Image: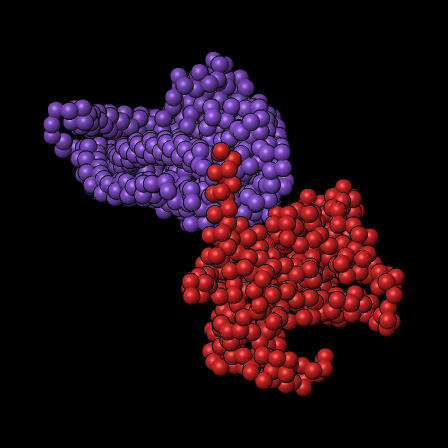
Amino acid sequence: MTFRTKLFLIFTLALVVSVGLVAAAVTEVTRRAFDQMNAQHSDALVAQFQREFAQRSEDVVHRVQGIADAEGTVRMAIDLSRPKGDVSVYVNDAAGVAKAHQLDFLDFISNDGSIISSAEWPARFGYKIDWVLQPEDWVARGSFLMKADTQEGPALALLSVSRVRVGDKDLYIVGGERLGREFIASLVLPTGMRALLYRNLDPTFQAADLIDSTGPATQADQFAAIVQKEQQEPGEQIAKINWTADAANAEVFHAMPLLGRQKELLGILLIGSSQHDVVTLQRQIMLLSVGVVGIGLLVGALLGWWGAARVTRPVRQLAEGAREVAGGNWNARVNVRGRNEIAQLAKAFNQMTEQLVDQRERLIQAERVAAWREVARRLAHELKNPLFPLQTTVENLQRAKERGYGEFEEVFHESTGILLAEIENLKNIVGRFSEFSKMPHPELGSVQLNEVVRSVVKLFEAQFGAVGRPPITPELHLDDHLPLIQADATLLHRALENLILNAMDAMPSGGVLMLRTSPAADGGVHLEISDTGTGLTSEECERLFTPYYTTKQHGTGLGLAIVQSVVSDHGGRIWVESEAGVGTSFHIELPKHPPRRSVSFPISFDYEKEKEKEPEPEKHKQEA
Amino acid sequence: MKRRLSLLAAASSAIVLLTALPVRTARRPRYGGTLRVEIGTSIKSLDPAVPAANSGEEPAKEQIDSLIYDVLEPKSKFTVNGAFHVTAFEAGKRAALAATEDYRLGRPFVDSIEITMGRASRDRIVDLELNKADFAEIPAEDARRAAEHGVRVSRSRPDELLALVFLRGGEPKRSRAVDGRVREAIALSIDRAAIVNFILQKEGEPAGGLLPHWSSGTAFLFSTVADVVHAKELSAQIVPVPKIVLGYDSGDSLEQAVAERIAVDAREARVQLTAQAVRPGLENATDARLVRLRMQSKSPGLALEGFVDTLGTLTKIEEKALPDPASPEEIYERERAIVSSYRVVPLVWLPRVYGLSGRVRDWTPPGPGESWPLADVWLDEPVEAAVEEGKK
């Protein structure tokens, strides 16, 4: 992921998070405001219900008291106070009186609690109502809720009791209103709110007992949990009912218990407020937020992209410049204007590359001079050896000429032989230099390295155990699962020959030559050639792969250079590990498929680093 | 002195009253006048060959027809001219009858009878109270109120039985036969005294048997007292207690009140009984019905036979005919057998109650199977006419 992409994502994420947080905050504030408003509406409705209830209660009390004060009722009381008062005359009176006073419930009850006449259940005359005889100040009690029996079944009633006393006998008038659909319909409700009444006439939840202003409530079963909770523990509670999967169809219900004389739960008033407006508003806010986020994202993306591009352009130029430098273009420069840190970095980069170019040129010059000096030294060294015999031979010839013909002929023949041999020697030296300068490019093919190793070792078997020479014991540790690699077997063979020759030279007193192959981590192969010779110093390791450098008396210094060249041409790497008195190990790693254009790695040696890795002072490593 | 003055004042007052008002007991029957009759039902046709449209119309039609046609032989369709003949008829609304001058049993006292049909009970009582009608049959439960409002009330001996009949099970659209213990529990739970005292306003008698005491003399052997404790015990034996539907005639307020009271009483015995109105002629899925059974004869045997004939169509009772003549013991045993099955639960005996205006004379309430003796009644002169006649 590019720096520009990262910056762009950071900008965008910051924008989304910001807008999201704002939208969430607005939504939450709105929801709370609606909740508060709903709570206020519910409270207002509860207060309205309580006012209505109190007004109805007072009205019921007045109407029942009015019946008690009526002349007909007093006359009835007087008649019934007589020893043979006939109650049957009044059996049908309650219905008419109740109708006249607009009461749903009216019972005339005699001194012993027997029903004289009942409006809500005319056939119930003669049966007793005991609770009315309980000692209680009915005037102080006013009206109260009660579960009243009717012909159709139990009903929730708002009742009041009045008493007419004649002599020592009482006539009770129990009247009231049904708390039902009409009562709910009388409540003035704001839009989006509704009231329901559950008549707690049964110990368990009964859906039919839940009514609203139109009659039995629909989907009453949904209220079972609220009702059951009230039945277990009466008290105000708030509950939410999701009618469908759509949250807009949910309703929040404020439940208020309606208690009777004995504080028993007789009914539950449920005031519901629709969540439609809240959810709709929340959705609108959400949609608006999404829109704002979308637009913000778009604008933010554009701005972020532009900003990121503006910020990362110099960085990208720097990276491009660095890549060019890494790719070999030492003349790469970064053109950055401004005074900020990036511009300063670019300037520093430009200075650094200029210094690098300068240093590289100086280094190349130095290396060239050094190389030429080395070549000159080697040439001088190589040429000096045959030149001395040539000089002495020619001087012998001159002296022989001066001494006489007979001796001259003898010396001439001997000297010309020497001269020819030395000239041949010079030609060989020149040939080897010429050969190194004309190293061929690898001809790639599938190569099994183990076979190359075996063939090379076989070639040297005779020399390992040659007479008059301390024996060298070859040890092969070849991995059978070594993969095939694309390589030039001839070049590899040649490189191996050089390494084995080096190893043999390093072990004049004999020893063990160990060759180990193993798969490399990148799918290639690894070859280790170790000897038990005298080892190399750090300086020797450092210069080991330098052409024309040799530690041997008669070496040309081209052997390891050839090896390094072969390995490089195969895209591999070679390094040496050596410890004085223990031996030297050459490591070669070759890829499975050499790159098309092999890169020659400059020889380097981090002596200090290797020193830290290897605590032994005489152990050295050289990597080519 | 004061005493003398008081006696003098009383004597003079008595003389004035005696001269101003006719002496009813001393006067002879008077011919003439129009008897104004009001009935509750609407008669579609006075032709005896045309059957009554419904069970409610039938008794009234029979009564009117009995004024127009005489049946010489019981159960015979051969008729001769009756005491009155029809002078005007408006189906379902009114009829006018005129006295038959050559009636075989002598001309009726009244010249004519005007019959207004379809008058509600309350209206009939009001009309009697306002002297707009001379004769009307009024429901027994309204008799007390009518009397309190100054209406002259005449009662027959109780000859109509209101009974609860558990219907025969297995018939189409009817519920299953009710368990005997449930029937007994319901029968025992019914407070007949309350029905008589409150609903019937003390008109009628609680009925334990199928025949009234004045007819059989054995009615006291049948208990009319409710036994709620035993009823509860019986209902407790049945799990679950079935829901019983008791049907009543939708146009009969008395049946409705009694049915609702039975429902209350049954509820006390922990039997779920629901009163349900039944429209005449329509099949309703009820388990029981309230039935009015009118005695067709003063003879207990014949009356019981008539009841059995009617009840046999409704419920499962033994329809074996009584021997002719049947002894009181045989009648009692038969009656006991039916009642003990609790398929028929006698509730109350109802009298027929008539409201009369003050000018109707020589009225005698008819007995079971008898028709209204309107040919025998005569109308007193109006008070104003009597006063005028006295002045002359």
Which of the 4 image quadrants contains residue B104? Answer: bottom right
Judge left or right: residue B65 versus residue B343. left
User: Which of A489 and A549 lies nearest the eye of the viewer?
Assistant: A489
Quadrant for the C terminus of chain B in the image: bottom left
Whether B194 is drawn above or below B50: the answer is above
The image quadrant of residue A600 is top left
Q: Is residue A493 above or below residue B213?
A: above
- The spot of residue A398 in percent (x, y) is 31, 28
Residue A82 seen in render: yes
Residue in the picture at 80% in, 52% down: B220
Expressed as whole percent of the image width and height from the top left, the position of residue A570 reads 41, 42
Viewer-closest of B113 and A193: B113
Q: Is residue A47 left or right of residue B378?
A: left
Residue ID at (84%, 72%): B321
Most extreme residue toward the left is A338
Indicate the chain coloured purple by its letter.
Answer: A
Seen from the viewer's position, the closer of residues B298 and A180 is B298
Colour in which chain B is drawn: red
Give the side of residue A540 with respect to residue B300, left or right. left
Residue A495 visible in image: no
Quadrant assignment, res A466: top right
Residue B306 drawn above or below residue A481? below
Q: Which x, y percent locates residue A50?
A: 39, 31
Residue positioned 51% across, 35% down in the render:
B3
**Location of residue A127 in the rendering, given as x and y in whole percent from the top left corner:** 63, 40
